[in-house]
Image (tube, rainbow, N blue to C red):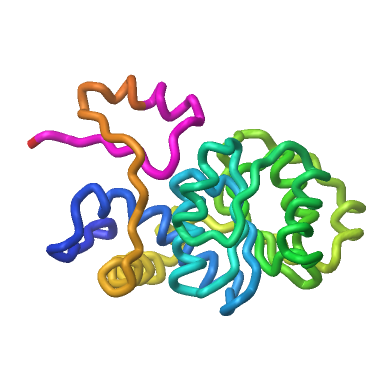
Amino acid sequence: FKDVFKIPEKMTFEHAASLADSYSTAQIVFSRHAKLKEKQTVLVTAAGGGLGLAAVDMATKIYKAKVIGVCNSEDKTDLIRQKGAWAALTFTNEKSLVNKVLEVSGGKYANVVFEAVGGEVFKAAMHCVGHEGKLVVAGFSSKVIPEVYMSELLQLPSISLIGVSLGNYRKHAPRIYRNTVKNVIKMYEEQNLVPHICDRFPLDQINEALKHFETGKTSGKLVINIKE
């Protein structure tokens, strides 16, 4: 029963399915690793996706942080701001992202970067972290391994590079895993964390759902409804 959780009456099954993984990952990142504090600046990549939007929602509503969201399309920026982000940027290249972050933050680098893309986005995000800041890798949506040289890391302002996987907590620290999911469910009840569901598909259209997901045009969660 490691993955069985009681949900409150007011929580829909769609929200329950969308909440547990993404929001629990964000909670572990911010509470156990980033040690996020009120008014600190957080840069969230893939901010228009399910995990990214959860991070934006969690950082703004629970931790009262200043969030800069980064996404791959201008179409998603309004949604990111609606979730509480102070600013929403589109990614074009490394230098451009760093300049945009400094522009909107008044010349300040991020205290925490929540990275969920990989590839060139990771390299750009790496250069957005301030002195003794934390770059936390929580996803790998691009499936592209970034090429980073040790000498490049040494030129950065003494940052911490951390990898976080909810699946690893489930395997190696099940008590923390279960408590985190329970806490997130409680936050949903008390502080109005609401997963964004962009599309719904019946089970017999799961192949169409996967094709739609692979276009990269989805925002938030895509839910498969399983009929009884």
Quarter of the figure with residue 66 = bottom right
Q: Is residue 195 left or right of residue 140?
A: left
Foreground of the two, 30 or 40 = 40
Which quadrant: the C terminus? top left
At 50% across and 51% down in the image, what residue appears?
A: 80
Residue 106 location (% of width, % of height): 77, 66
Residue 145 location (% of width, % of height): 69, 37
Which quadrant: the N terminus? bottom left
Residue 142 location (% of width, % of height): 60, 35
Q: Is residue 221 left or right of residue 51?
A: left
At 51% across and 54% down in the image, what residue appears?
A: 81
Residue interval drawn in magenta: 210-227
Q: Is residue 77 left or right of residue 127?
A: left
Quarter of the figure with residue 129 = bottom right
Q: Residue furthest left?
A: 228
Residue 134 location (% of width, % of height): 69, 66
At 79% across and 44% down in the image, what residue appears?
A: 96
Above or below, comparing residue 101 to residue 110 in the picture? above
- Quick check: is 7 in the magenta stretch? no
At 35% across and 63% down in the image, what residue appears?
A: 193
